[in-house]
Amino acid sequence: MTKKIIYRLQLPFQSKTVIILDKRAIKSIGDDTNVKISELLKKDANQMSFEVFPPKTSDKYDSVQAATESIAALHPAFMSVTYGAGGGTSKYTLDIAKNIERSHGVLSLAHLTCVNSTKGTVRERIADIKAAGIQNIMALRGDLTPEMEKKDRADWDYHHAVELIREIKESGDFCVGAACYPEVHPESANQHEDIMHLKEKVDAGADFLTTQMFFDNNLFYNFLYKIREAGITCPVIPGIMPITNANQVERAIQLSGSFMPQRFKSLVDAFGNDPKAMCQAGIAYATDQIIDLYANGIRFVHVYSMNKPNVASAILDNLSEIVKR
Ligand code: FAD
């Protein structure tokens, strides 16, 4: 039976909407979601995933859902759905992740954090994820609000991602991802200590790692070398953030502490005041980083697409002969 599925997609720099008849969606719904990300990572093909975030409040739910659906219509290998700082959007994380899988046949990765955790709430959330048929969980400590940073957090039952990984692995047959930091996590005294804690996460059962954003690929290659030396052998997915407006720059540095190469700073200086030019330049810069990663043998790249279908689709268009979908 032929079924028409119509997606509305904002093209880059255009305000009009186009309608796409997506034949792949017809055959793939339901088929591609019974997979673990660890299996995808074994493929000898260039692949890409996108990250989206859930709404903070219910009034934004529909617009966020529409944006995530437009990204799912591009058929990335998987989509990850973040878990909001402070844990406030836990229900929406799962709802958006379920919607991506059920309506678009795209595999989803639901994030889960230790923030304000109790054994009861974490077990309940894992049970909900399992009941929704989602097999992939990203286990994180979580971003801290300024108030949390001041407290000792003794009332949390899980303080580090490693404890969450153990809990998830004991709760079912999940594929678990964890975060890693090519430029060292800001709370770590040094890289050696950070890598030792990273190894604990992998030894606890993390099946793959995704990196914090970085803007200089050499930092990633260097990090990869160091963690392999430390005995960490699982797949590592580099995370690339396309910076498409000047305001994002400060926020990105504040959150990640990432080093901004002069080449990138010049681009922001030149185009930061022209939104369309900055968007185009930011996409080109991210594309360049991604091409370099594939050219150096990396098979899987994660893009922090931030609920922007135009950015996700522009990057895939730029890579149409490199990432075959
Ligand atoms: P951990 O692995 O717990 O590490 C945090 C710090 O503690 C590090 O310095 C580490 O070296 C140290 N450490 C680790 N284990 C121990 C231990 N046993 N004893 C002492 N020290 C230890 N945040 C959100 O709120 N929601 C999200 O959805 C989200 N998604 C993310 C996705 C990716 C790919 C990345 C890279 C980050 C994401 N974050 C998210 C941000 C993340 O939560 C923060 O960077 C947080 O500060 C650390 O999380 P973690 O899981 O790496 O923590």
Image (cartoon, helix red, strand yellow):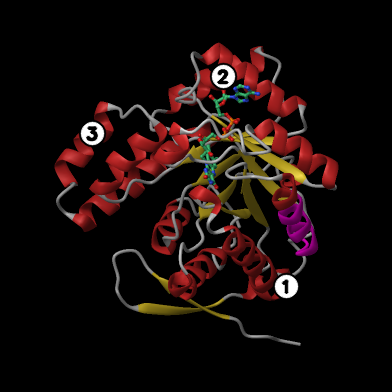
Type of amino acid under label 1: Lys
Q: Quadrant of the N terminus?
A: bottom right
Q: Which mark is residue 103?
A: none
Q: Is residue 18 visible?
A: yes
Specify the quadrant of the image occupied by residue 289. top left
Density class for disc 3 (Cα within 10 Å; few <14, some 14-19, many ≥20) is few
Read off the residue under disc 1. Answer: 27
Left or right: 160 as drawn, with respect to 302: right
Counting from the top left corner in percent of width and height, residue 226 is at 58, 15
If you read the primary sequence from the N terminus, does the residue marked by circle 1 or circle 2 appear first? 1
Residue visible at 41% across and 78% down in the picture:
18
If you read the primary sequence from the N terminus, does the residue marked by circle 2 or circle 3 appear first? 2
Read off the residue under disc 3. Answer: 265
Type of amino acid under label 2: Asp
Residue visible at 62% across and 85% down in the picture:
4
Type of amino acid under label 3: Lys
Mark 2 lies within 8 Å of ligand 1 (Cβ measured)? yes
